[in-house]
């Protein structure tokens, strides 16, 4: 099913939403208010639902309008980026919009971006650091071109390409008793206050499921929302924490150490997720190729 609309229809909708006024939007676009209204009506007819709620004093997007707005912004940004690229062919320009789980965004994504920016200095990147569930939703709705996310989603409309395996490890202070061991087994954690992320986290879901298959369970004492918070509690000496290795300090830390946890080893797989029906922009294709080259799991 195709939707018949023009770029100017999309610009009209964006202007009304952002300026919250038909009058101001018409002035900004240098068109009459009746012409603006016709463009909005045309877009609503194409989508098959009202996009704006109108009162005498206020204009606001409907629920459908709120859902459509991020996609409209991305389409206009990509269109404008393509115009810039056509206008100056010697300068390789473009915009890449991606979602990325925060640990990946912080620890290994900057290395790839640094290499990419040297080769393509005029391609801009918009990185939305979102939780695993939020990132998958952003990809599914078309708000981003692709995501760097955890494997495990069962949505048949999304395709997943593995990049790296990221094992769960134990983080603790250097003066903790368990720091004497080279590897840790799960039953060794039981006597100590344990910090975990809450059940809304994709990491917690993955970890609980893997341990349940081995009849193991984490007896937590502190439950937090963010991985960084758990590290803060560990550094303060309040407990120990099971975290993905990428979420722990990668360099020598003055207070903290990590140890592998075995029997079983539990890992999460991080990879590239995108809609099966979508085609990446040339800029995004270049970036994904570089990601695969740098981080593809052997």
Image: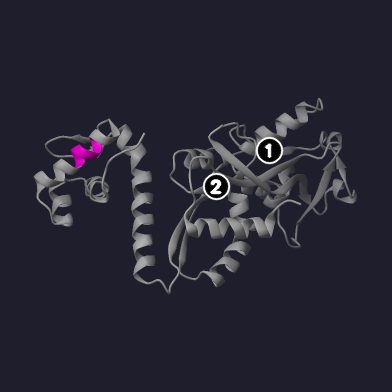
The chief SS type of the magenta part is helix
Which is more toward the observer, 169 or 167? 167
Display coloring: one colour
- Residue 238 position, x and y percent, is 72, 44
Q: Secondary structure at mark 2?
A: strand
Tell me the number on the disc at residue 29. Answer: none
Which x, y percent locates residue 34? 9, 44
Q: Which residues are magenta?
A: 40-44
Decide if residue 238 is in sight here: no
Pinpoint residue 164: horizontal percent, then vertical percent: 70, 50
Say which element carries label 1: strand
Q: Position of residue 190 (x, y in %)?
A: 82, 33
Q: Quadrant of the N terminus?
A: top left
Which residue: 62% across, 34% down?
198
* Disc on the earlier residue, 1 or 2: 2
**Mark 1 Cα within 10 Å, few/some/many (few <14, many 20+)?**
many
Which residue is found at the position 54% from the left and 68% from the top?
117
* Circle nearer the viewer, 1 or 2: 2
Q: Is residue 154 magenta?
A: no
Q: Relative to residue 230, is residue 131 drawn left or right?
A: left
- Can residue 258 be seen by looking at this rendering? yes
Dot 1 corresponds to which residue?
Answer: 196
- Which residue has dot 2 on it? 147
Q: As drawn, is 26 to the left or to the right of 109?
A: left
Residue at mark 1 to residue at mark 2: CA–CA distance: 25 Å
Instruction: Decide if residue 26 is on the left or right side of residue 89.
Output: left
Q: Residues within 10 Å of mark 2 (few under 14, many from 20)?
A: many
| Cβ–Cβ under 8 Å for marks 1 and 2 | no
Q: Which residue sits furthest front? A: 1
Question: Magenta includes 41?
Answer: yes
């Amino acid at each position: 099913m195709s939707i018949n609309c023009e770029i100017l229809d999309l610009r009209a909708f964006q202007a009304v939403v952002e300026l919250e006024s038909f009058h101001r939007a018409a002035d900004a676009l240098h068109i009459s208010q009746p012409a603006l209204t016709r463009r909005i009506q045309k877009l609503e007819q194409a989508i098959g639902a009202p996009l704006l709620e109108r009162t005498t004093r206020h204009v606001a997007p409907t629920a459908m309008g709120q859902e459509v707005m991020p996609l409209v912004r991305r389409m206009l940004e990509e269109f404008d980026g393509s115009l810039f690229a056509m206008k100056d062919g010697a300068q390789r320009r473009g915009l890449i919009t991606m979602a990325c789980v925060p640990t990946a965004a912080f620890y290994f994504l900057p290395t790839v971006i640094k290499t990419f920016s040297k080769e393509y200095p005029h391609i801009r990147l918009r990185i939305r650091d979102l939780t695993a569930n939020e990132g998958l939703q952003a990809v599914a709705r078309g708000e981003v071109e692709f995501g760097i996310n955890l494997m495990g989603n069962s949505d048949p409309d999304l395709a997943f390409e593995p990049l790296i395996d990221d094992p769960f490890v134990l983080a603790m202070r250097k003066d903790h008793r368990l720091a004497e061991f080279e590897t840790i087994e799960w039953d060794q954690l039981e006597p100590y206050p344990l910090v975990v992320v809450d059940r809304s986290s994709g990491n917690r879901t993955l970890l609980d499921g893997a341990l349940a298959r081995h009849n193991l369970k984490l007896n937590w004492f502190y439950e937090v929302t963010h991985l960084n918070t758990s590290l803060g509690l560990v550094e303060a000496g309040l407990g120990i924490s099971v975290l993905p290795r990428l979420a722990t300090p990668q360099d020598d830390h003055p207070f903290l150490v990590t140890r592998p946890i075995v029997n079983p080893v539990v890992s999460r797989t991080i990879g590239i997720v995108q809609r099966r029906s979508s085609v990446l922009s040339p800029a995004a294709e270049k970036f994904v190729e570089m990601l695969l080259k740098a981080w593809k799991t052997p």
